[in-house]
Image (cartoon, rainbow, N blue to C red):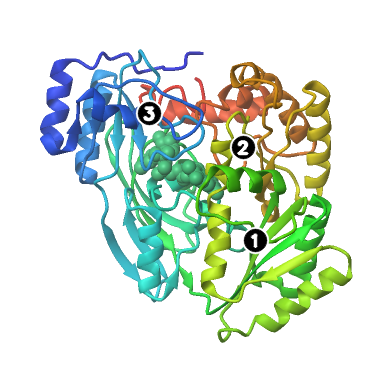
Amino acid sequence: MTANMGATGPVTKDVLQRLRSVTGPAGIIEDPADVAPYCKSWRDDWQGKVPAVLRPQSTEEVARIVRICAEAGIGIIPQGGNTGLTGAGQPITDTAEIILSTSRMKKIRAIDTVNDTITVEAGVVLKEIQDAADRADRLFPLSLGAEGSCQIGGNISTNAGGVQVLRYGNTRNLVLGLEVVLPDGRIWDGLRSLRKDNTGYDMKQLFIGGEGTLGVITAAVLRLFPKPTARETAWVALDSPEAGVALLGHMRRQMGDAVSALELICRAIIDFLLTGVPGHEDPMRTPYPWYVLMDVTSQGPAGSLHGPFSEALAGAQEAGLIRDALICASGAQAAKLWKIRESLAEAQLSAGGSIAHDVSVPVSRIPEFLKRADAMLEKAYPGIRHCAFGHVGDGNMHYNPVRPKDWDWPRFSAERANVNRIVHDIVVELGGSISAEHGIGRSRLAELEHYKDPIELDMMRALKRTLDPKGIMNPGKVIRV
Ligand SMILES: Cc1cc2nc3c(=O)[nH]c(=O)nc-3n(C[C@H](O)[C@H](O)[C@H](O)COP(=O)(O)OP(=O)(O)OC[C@H]3O[C@@H](n4cnc5c(N)ncnc54)[C@H](O)[C@@H]3O)c2cc1C
């Protein structure tokens, strides 16, 4: 097995000249100082070097770049907003690679409000799609903390989740069609906008969550939904994750699919937020061990959910599930609370010294997972600080223990593999996944090989070899052949 099958290069002056002639000078970055930010990750310090970043403006330009790279054995790292959290968008130093950024492919090609679809190019920023849908009186429900900078090509390639999966599903559920440049430079036009299409294998699914290892997504047809007209938001205080899971069940029994988001948040990360990220205040005067941030939405008249929502929360309080609840009095107050949720990744970063996990287990087993992982880590690393938050309705927790206070970061960081093994062994024992929504990239490559069914790994390798026989698409990420 080699990490970088086909990226043998080198990226010669002649190759660079040919690439330059495709995009023109405005579409290539070669000054090392300008290239550097594309080579560095937002978190975890993944970095490497490439001689150039290509910024094509059209699908045809992407195809020409891919053909040149395929001929010359140059690896291609597709990149959107570079907000990924697994090192999948960064180069591996000493390999022959270029970065292909979709940041100039920004057209919204069409909105069809009868079919409820929007067709967009890969470089459109997620927030711009949400806004375009909103202007058309529709909802595009994908929503996550990086939505102001991540691009839809990156969202699709990571099968991003976010805070509304509970009601609308993850990105896979939101994509109807794709346009993809294959590793040999052919353009596959799969931009269908059908909800039913049983004509053989569903090829788009391979590229959704493929992390750029099978081709470059250049455009997509996405599903739109009716825009909710009634919405209520609450910040709820709890004693334990058990109460959080019970509250989820209670609210769904009371309000059904109106429950569109339900996030579980531990106190520790709120403390990191309040000390490390300016502009936030504690939503409640008294601190509690755990919180839930929750949205209910419907198509009814504005305000129509207030009564049922208050009653459901009162019922939860009577049943002893919650300690306190703050129901937002205005959209501005709700936005402030959601800003807290969106800033938690930044809060974690500002705390310094945590080892991140993005895991899922069956919802019913979340409390058991947290209890066992906390206990095992405390035994191995006395004084370790527990920190967890996430999309409890999807069984997905960001479990990010922080170094003991008297340890420095290099000492704790050296334990990363062991901490990962402790956490992931428990996850797998509980029937869970070592990567719920962030993907594999480079950071989970070895663990994927350790935990994944060998038959599944064989199928993944067979697909990679078939679609990318030269191994030029994002080499060394997701699957080693
Ligand atoms: C503050 C913050 C909060 C976040 N919250 C969430 C969350 O709640 N849920 C969640 O799922 N993720 C979350 N993330 C992770 C990240 O935002 C998502 O993974 C996002 O979908 C990545 O989009 P991007 O455009 O930045 O992709 P990039 O980081 O540029 O790329 C990610 C991967 O996709 C590939 N790729 C990019 N564009 C293409 C393309 N056009 N064709 C083929 N491959 C491509 C890259 O090669 C790489 O493998 C968060 C990140 C941050 C920084």
Query: Mark 3 = which residue?
Result: 473
Q: What secondary structure is marked by label 3?
A: loop
Residue 417 point in image, percent of width and height = 65, 20
Q: CA distance from mark 3 to mark 1?
A: 46 Å
Using the rendered image of the protein, determine whether residue 222 is visible from the camera's viewpoint. yes
Q: Nearer the viewer, mark 2 or mark 1?
A: 1
Q: Looking at the image, is mark 2 or mark 1 earlier in the sequence?
A: 1
Q: Is residue 151 above or below residue 255?
A: above
Q: Is residue 412 above or below residue 102?
A: above
Q: Looking at the image, is mark 3 or mark 1 earlier in the sequence?
A: 1
Q: Is 60 positioned to the left or the right of 310 in the image?
A: left
Residue type at the position of mark 2: Ser
Q: What secondary structure is marked by label 2?
A: loop
Q: Residue at x 79, y 50 (%)?
A: 241
Q: Is residue 61 above or below residue 355?
A: below
Judge the density around disc 2: few (<14), some (14-19), many (≥20) Cα neighbours within 10 Å.
many
Query: Mark 2 = which residue?
Result: 435
> Splitting the image into 4 quarters, where does residue 168 fall?
bottom right
* Residue farthest toward the right in the current orientation of the protein: 319
Judge the density around disc 3: few (<14), some (14-19), many (≥20) Cα neighbours within 10 Å.
many
Residue type at the position of mark 3: Met
Q: CA distance from mark 2 to mark 1?
A: 31 Å
Residue type at the position of mark 1: Pro
Residue 312 point in image, percent of width and height = 77, 75
Q: Nearer the viewer, residue 477 or 423?
A: 423
Residue 435 point in image, percent of width and height = 61, 37
On residue 283, the disc is 1
Judge the density around disc 1: few (<14), some (14-19), many (≥20) Cα neighbours within 10 Å.
some
Is disc 3 in contact with disc 1, using a CB cutoff of under 8 Å? no
Q: Is 64 positioned to the left or the right of 341 in the image?
A: left
